[in-house]
């Protein structure tokens, strides 16, 4: 019984890690679309376009 509980806990922990990593990747992806590199740091695409003119 204890072995089964440990295995279930391990599976739940792995699922939590997987979902956390997916969420982090989604955040990084969204952030990458919202921010673009600029000499002074990260700025929004709108500001980047204004600075590029």
Image (spheres, helix red, strand yellow):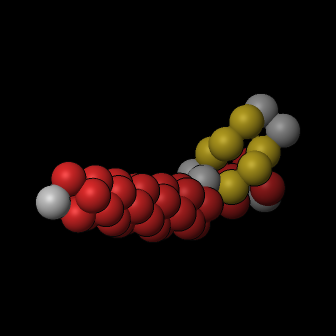
In the image, residue 47 above or below residue 23: above
Write the residue at 35% across / 57% down: 10
Quadrant including the C terminus: bottom right
Side (left or right) of 17 relative to 48:
left
Occupied quadrant, residue 40: top right
- The location of residue 27, given as percent across then percent down, is 46, 58
Question: Could you say which is closer to the camera, residue 4 or residue 9?
Answer: 4
Write the residue at 53% across / 63% down: 25
- The location of residue 32, given as percent across then percent down, is 61, 60
Occupied quadrant, residue 42: top right
Residue that protrudes farthest toward the right in the picture: 39
Can residue 16 be seen here? The reply is no
Can residue 32 be seen here? The reply is yes
Quadrant including the N terminus: bottom left
Side (left or right) of 41 relative to 30:
right
Side (left or right) of 49 relative to 35:
right
- The location of residue 39, given as percent across then percent down, is 84, 38
Residue that protrudes farthest toward the top in the picture: 40
Occupied quadrant, residue 23: bottom left
- The location of residue 22, given as percent across then percent down, is 45, 67
């Amino acid at each position: 019984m204890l072995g089964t509980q440990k295995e279930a806990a391990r599976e739940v922990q792995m699922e939590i890690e997987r979902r956390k990593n997916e969420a982090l990747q989604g955040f990084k992806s969204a952030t990458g679309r919202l921010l673009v590199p600029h000499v002074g740091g990260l700025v929004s695409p709108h500001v980047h376009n204004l600075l590029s003119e």
